[in-house]
Image: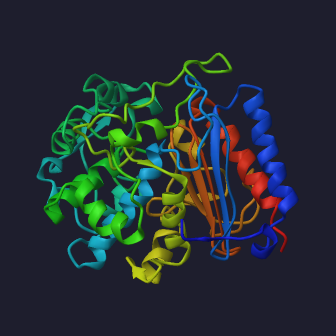
Amino acid sequence: MSLQIVTPEKAGLSTDRLKRLMGVLQREVDAKRLPGAVVVVARHGKTALFESVGELSPITGETMRCDARFRIYSMTKPIVSVAAMMLVEDGRLLLADAVAKHLPEFAGQQVAAASGEVPVQRDATVHDLLRHTAGMTYEFLGSGPVQRQYAQLRLGSRDRSLADFTHSLASLPLLFQPASVFEYSRATDVLGRVIEVISGQSLQDFLNERVFAPLRMPDTSFTVPPEFHGHIAEPFARDPEGGLQMKVIDVRTDAALASGGGGLISTAQDYARFLQFMLNRGELDGQRLLGPQTIDFMTTDHLGDLPVAAGGSRALLPPGHGFGLGYAVRKQLGVAPVPGSAGTYFWGGLAGTSFFVDPKLDLFGILMLQAPNQREYFRMLFRNMVYAAVLD
């Protein structure tokens, strides 16, 4: 990680309060509620905290390492959203494009209704994919008829190609009319296929060439090579609080599906470079991938007055937040249950990883862990304690 490591005070942060954060995480490890974690806190382009705690694997008991590889699940979405905006800046894609322009299988979509299926009032666009207003859903966000169809078609399977996935998804009705509701969904997987069609490359190859290589993120991919299998962070075999333990994806073998919505594995240092690129408004170490205005455009609210669907989607957007192009965005200082400046943007992953970026304070934080059922608790805990360490 090229971000210079300094004493916290040189970055406007408190050494004692960051030690307190690590002490609290150690307490959670000692209580057997957290296997282990890697933490990065950076400000003004300098790393004030880069430490690990706990175990890499509860099975082996090996100590957590700072270069551990984590299943980042939906923290894949911001990266794929950046890749799509690169195609916009290349002049090869418009946000106003209908999805069907690039993926004909999405032409003539139908929307589920009480009376049966009705035609879409307007086609879903690439903009809708990026801001999750395309009318799609996730099978785990509810138990309605559309979600049951998602489950019956096994849309979460990693055994089909991205092209096969989009054809299967396109055969199902939408849950909502496009551009009418924010519903967190498999839209970013579809966006990954749009990138493939336009670029003529696999999603992995496009990301490698256009994002990971220039930003020097060598440990981020859809599969962990055999020589690094010993670096993979693992969750507990059983939920420490007695809940139903989520089965995490097998990242040791190649999957047919390159999931743009949730398939990447990464390290804290790789993702820190991505976030510093974002905080720098599109540039890192002389490599400019996006223009500053594009970054600003991505990290502002794109929902406006559109409602947020009840249930799982509403839980993902705290009060006082909207959604941009791949990121949740804080709209005001108050209302939300965690600290943060207006303009702060963030997201997380199903297995527990999370990040936030606060442009006003020139600050970002990353919490890498694999504790699926405790993820919301640790995200709020982490945010509270990082902001408590800010000195100005």
The N terminus lies in which quarter of the figure?
bottom right
Report whether residue 140 is seen.
Answer: yes
Residue 50 lies left or right of residue 76; in this view the side is right
- Colour scheme employed for the rendering of this structure: rainbow
Q: Nearer the viewer, residue 180 or 326?
A: 326
Residue 358 lies left or right of residue 265; in this view the side is right
- Percent across and percent down for residue 126 are 29, 61
Q: Nearer the viewer, residue 6 or 148?
A: 6
The C terminus lies in which quarter of the figure?
bottom right
Residue 97 lies, with reference to residue 312, above or below; the image says below
Q: Residue furthest right?
A: 16
Q: Residue at x 76, y 61 (%)?
A: 334
Q: Quadrant of residue 325?
A: bottom left
Q: How many numbered discs sit on the rendered protein?
A: 0
- Percent across and percent down for residue 140 are 44, 30
Residue 387 lies left or right of residue 211; in this view the side is right
Q: Residue at x 51, y 66 (%)?
A: 273
Residue 204 lies left or right of residue 386; in this view the side is left
Residue 148 lies, with reference to residue 36, above or below; the image says above
- Percent across and percent down for residue 297 are 46, 75
Q: Residue at x 33, y 38 (%)?
A: 226
Q: Quadrant of residue 201?
A: bottom left
Q: Nearer the viewer, residue 189 or 2?
A: 2
Report whether residue 177 is seen.
Answer: no
Q: Residue at x 68, y 75 (%)?
A: 360
- Percent across and percent down for residue 387 are 78, 60
